[in-house]
Image: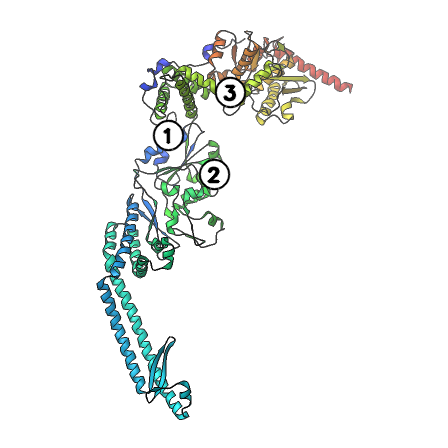
Amino acid sequence: MLSPISYKQLKDSFNSKNLNCKTTEELEPLEGIIGQDRAVKSLKFGLNIENNGFNIYVSGYSGTGRTTSVKEFVQDIAKTKPTPYDWCYVNNFKDSYQPNAIKLPAGKGKCFQEDMKNFISSIRVLLPKTFESKDYVEKRDSIIKNIESKKEKLLSDLNRRAAESGFVLKSTQIGVFIVPLIDGKILSDQEFLSLPQEKIEEIRQKREKVNDDLKITMEEVRDLDKILNEELKKLNHDVALYTIEKSVNDIKDKYKKIDEVLEFIEDVKDDILKNVDIFISGQSQDFSSAQLFPWMKDVPFKKYEVNLIVDNSSLKGAPVIIEKNPTYQNLFGRIEKEAQFGVLTTDFTMIRGGSLHNANGGFLVMPVEELLKNFFSWDSLKMALLDKKITIEEAGEKLGFITTKGLKPEPIPLNIKIVLIGNPIYYYLLHSLDEDFKKLFKIKADFDIEMDKTSENIKKYASFICMLCKKENLKHIDAEAVAKIIDYGSRLAENKNKLTTKFSAISDLIFEANYYAQLEKSKYIKQSHVLKALDEKVYRSNLLAEKIRELIANGTILIDIEGEKIGQVNGLSVIDLGDYSFGRPSRVTVTIGIGKDGIIDIERETKLGGPIHTKGVLILGGYLTEKFSKDKPLNLSARIVFEQSYSGVEGDSASSAELYALLSALSDIPIKQNFAVTGSVNQKGQIQAIGGVNEKIEGFFEICKIKGFTGEQGVIIPEANIKNLMLKDEVVEAVKQKKFHIYAVKTVDEGIEILTGVKAGKLKPDGTFEKNSINYRIDLRLRDFIKKMEKSSKTK
């Protein structure tokens, strides 16, 4: 029979002397990412490769420091990259509904915006002054006087010719009329009609000639008015051009290497020369609306502004944007609107950039869970990456809901590296269900939840603790306390040869320990503060565990820790409350009889058993068939149940306990109730590793402590789980004093021998088992069942 494992195997405590320091104050803070060599290598490759589609999915669980580590890592690489362009939107003078995008070297965007603002401001002052100057007034008056004199001469000659024909021209508000004269006297209508018919006809004929002459003359007058307008327009154009030309040339010289800017400035110049009047009237504020609403005087000049949507003037290297809320508008920008006189209006100055604009030429980091939650964001991001451009449009337009005319800004070329951070499940789902995901995210960086417990990694662990203390302004930690934190890291990793990389949990422990150190006004965080933090963390969350132990102690939940019972064993399970997990003993019982039902799982029949638990029970049938049914059928009806279990049962870690109870019932040999059992079993009878081994052992230990130690109690675990043991000091001490025992087994035979004190029995060459062994008695029992079944059949 096996001996219990040594207390030395129950925990691998780190020796604080190996730190070679008294406190973390003597250590150097950690730089870089710890324990994620695979992820770092993938990140380096993904961030530096320039080819399309090599965006990165950072796969890992929350608390491993994936976001913080990726941010710091990406920022370091971004510093070595060139600073990308500034981007701005300007008015498209050919089509104001399609604003133009202009790129400028980093820092030039703000300068260009300010230069245009100053240019228009100066023009609004200079042009009115120029058009009020004496030189301009004299030139304008000279042109007007010249044209007016020509008009007067034409009209004077017309009057003379009309008088020679016996008419006079009479001007009214509705036009010019030809009125006949007789003896120098203007005839009224009645006097005209009272004339002889011959005279009237003569006057009418002469009037037609004069009327034709009038038409010709008025055409010439209108031509002179057109000439006047054209000459005044040309004068205004030349004067305005002379006024603004130097300022225009100055801006052109400043941006002479940027063709798009030169084209825009030329368009601005042409538009100013075409609309000189708005500069004059705008300055004088002649409009009544401008007097009522002073802000309106600036409206005509908005079309000359520069809307800077990406400003990299203060950036050194490539941008790194962390977008925690990747909604469609936060990613792709928006076109804002404002109400004017009850109507929503917009223009290019209301275009706002998003995270893609700000990260363009650099790196954009996003949580994939939030990205997939937001409508449009995921599909639109894929489209932008495939098309290599950022298009700003209303979300409603993508669905065809908005039919009113709106702005369609020119798309901006996209050159970006996307880093998505999320749980592994999202990677697998996207990779299997989304074809575009495979094309766009070709790099996977896996963040592990544990790392090897090497001396080098332990030093880095201590350096991380030092870094946290300095960064968060915490008290430094003495060496013994650091050793306890390292032990806690192994406990979280559930492996004495590993350390957890869930640094959020380590950080939380240090924060709590720092609090208790402050209460005691201690200079350093000591081991007692760490232990206090661990105990208090458990106390805050273990109310349910205490209630269950109380119910076991007072006999409400039936658990035996002494005596022997046939077909009954103490199984162990883990209850996970999210922030706290604890082990709970459960009584597993088996009843058997003659029949052909086989093994019936009551949990499955009542729909309380999960698929993995059901699989574990079905394996028991495979084990019995392999061992006892090679030469005979299994005429067996057995029922297995977790007693006093009223919620779902999942997992196969109790399958060995179920099998032990079944073997006990079949052999009619009792099981010692001072043991609890955990471990899964395969059809060959091998005991396989399970999870939560520390919690399970400690769960039964607490029950034994409450009911009283006899020196015989213990737990049987799979041998493969020895490496996972990081038990509490209290349990280790109890094992050392032989109050409690832990056995590790490889096979069912080893386990049943410990539980019953009876030899399991090997199969002999003749197909029988060793006499009086457990397997021998089971074989006899099954053969007896066959005989009774045959007898029952003959009787019927």
Q: How far across and down, in percent of the image, does residue 466 sit? A: 35, 22
Residue on which the image places disc 3: 692
Q: Is residue 795 left or right of residue 571?
A: right
What is the tally of numbered marks visible in this picture? 3
Earlier in the chain: of badge 3 and badge 1, it is: 1
Earlier in the chain: of badge 1 and badge 2, it is: 1
Q: Amino acid at mark 1?
A: Val
Decide: is 787 above or below 56: above
Q: Give whichever of 91, 694 is nearer the camera.
A: 91
Residue on which the image places disc 1: 40
Using the numbered discs, state the Cα–Cα distance from disc 1 to disc 2 in whole angstroms.
25 Å
Residue drawn where x is 78% and y is 18% of the image: 795
Given contact means CB atoms under 8 Å apart, are the residues at marks 3 and 2 in contact?
Answer: no
Q: Specify the quadrant that holds the N terminus.
A: top right
Given contact means CB atoms under 8 Å apart, are the residues at marks 1 and 2 in contact?
Answer: no
Q: Toward which corner of the image does residue 70 lie, by quadrant?
A: top left
Q: How far across and down, in percent of the image, does residue 302 sit? A: 35, 53
Q: Is residue 463 left or right of residue 657?
A: left
Q: Residue furthest right?
A: 796
Residue drawn where x is 36% and y is 84% of the image: 179
